[in-house]
Amino acid sequence: MRVIIGADHAGYELKKILAEYVEALGHRVVDVGARTYDRSDDYPDFAEEVAKAVTGEKGERGILICGSGVGASIVANKVPGIRAGICHDTYSAHQGVEHDNMNVLVLGSRIIGVELARDIVKTYLAAKFSGEERHTRRLLKITEIEKSYLKG
């Protein structure tokens, strides 16, 4: 699987660690930045890049990292077709994919440690959308809501 990964300065170090880990799991990593540590960079820039790459089919899933995960999640979810979720536990990571077809995992580097982040990423990447009728029905409703706001 191709995995798009991005982070601002707050997530920069964890991004480097997780990119190596994702590759060790056998996936291809597409790093959209930050490429260097820059304390003055802004999370919206990287969140948008990850989201655009996922919706542009440059990767099947995305991983975003900022300090809390909140800001990056807000930005990513502005991009039509993105279903980003902040997950700081493995249950949410697999359930978000299985039930909600989550395509961007968001992590807060100031919230969780490296080992938990690795566990969450591994769980997220291994999860598959269930395709169950109730989950598909709900996703269609989400898509219709999104479309209704795009019309204006």
Image (cartoon, rainbow, N blue to C red):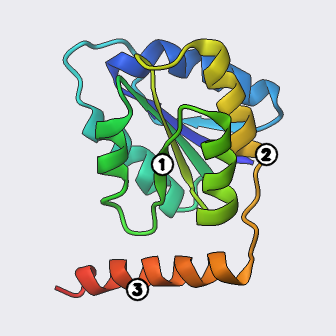
Name the image quarter holding residue 78.
bottom left
Q: Residue at x 58, y 64 (%)?
A: 100
Q: Amino acid at mark 2?
A: Ala
Q: Amino acid at mark 3?
A: Glu
Nearest to the observer: residue 143 or residue 4: 143
Give the number of the disc on residue 126. 2
Q: Which amino acid, by three-letter code, is at mark 1?
A: Gly
Q: Look at the picture and state if 4 lies above or below 76.
A: above
Residue 44 screen position, x and y as percent: 26, 40
Residue name at image x 74 percent, y 34 percent: 122
Quadrant of the rendering where the C terminus is positioned? bottom left
Q: Which mark is residue 85?
A: 1
Disc 1 residue crowd, few under 14, some 14–19, many 20+, Cα 10 Å: many
Q: Are marks 3 and 1 in contact (CB under 8 Å)?
A: no
Q: Quadrant for residue 68, please give it.
A: top left
- Image x and y of residue 15, in percent: 52, 22
Query: Is residue 64 in view?
Result: yes
Residue at the spot 33% in from the left edge and 18% down from the top edge: 9
Label number found at residue 51: none
Task: Estimate the spatial distance between the alpha carbons at disc 3 and disc 1, rounded to whole Å.
Answer: 19 Å
Task: Tell me if residue 12 comes above or below residue 126 in the rendering.
Answer: above
N-term mark: 2 or 3: 2
**Label 2 to label 3: alpha-carbon separation:** 28 Å
Q: Give the class, few, some or many, for how many residues have Cα within 10 Å of label 2's Cα (few <14, many ≥20).
A: few
Q: Position of residue 143 (x, y in %)?
A: 44, 80
Provide the secondary structure element on which disc 1 rests: strand
Tell me the element at label 2: helix
